[in-house]
Image (cartoon, rainbow, N blue to C red):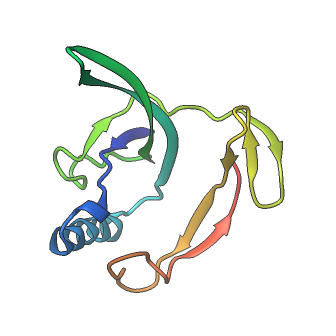
Amino acid sequence: MYTYELRSVNLRNLPEKDAAAVLGRFALLLDSLTDPVSFLMVSDSKVVLTLGEGSFLRYSTPCKRFFVTSPVKLDSLLERGSYTLAESIPVLKIKKFEPTYSIDEESGIVRAYSVTRLGGRIQSGVPERCLLSSSFC
């Protein structure tokens, strides 16, 4: 299994033309897939250094990390510089299962979705024609 960590892009901070280009490249990636893949988003934290009053201050800030796993290499499909090969993905330890979500050991809500079919060409923005079904690992 091949695991890639994807570089996140904040679409809200991009000009509309650039945001559309990013979404277009993502749509091309999805159109190019020939094998099932899994996309995972993990809430994490990152230590950031800032300069304050003559010295560096360290603080932890929340962030999202994005991964894709595939049984085949995706290097040729992923845009250069938009990913790194990942050694592993942070593992969830589920404490409680509910009908539509789970709760992990850190009291975070966990949801999983399976894209079962994409209809036609994906439009820019949220793909409304994706049929989603809840499932848990």
Question: From the viewer's perspective, is 96 left or right of 35?
Answer: right
Question: From the viewer's perspective, is 51 left or right of 97?
Answer: left
x 53%, y 32%: residue: 90
x 49%, y 52%: residue: 38
Question: From the viewer's perspective, is 66 left or right of 19?
Answer: right
x 49%, y 48%: residue: 41
Quadrant of the snapshot with the N terminus: top left
Q: Position of residue 98 (x, y in %)?
A: 83, 53
Question: From the viewer's perspective, is 38 left or right of 81?
Answer: right
Q: Position of residue 9 (x, y in %)?
A: 29, 54
- Residue 35 lies in quadrant: bottom left
- Residue 135 lies in quadrant: bottom right
Q: Nearer the viewer, residue 2 or 13?
A: 13
Q: Position of residue 131 (x, y in %)?
A: 57, 77
x 31%, y 56%: residue: 10
Residue positioned most to the bottom:
120
Q: Position of residue 29 (x, y in %)?
A: 29, 64
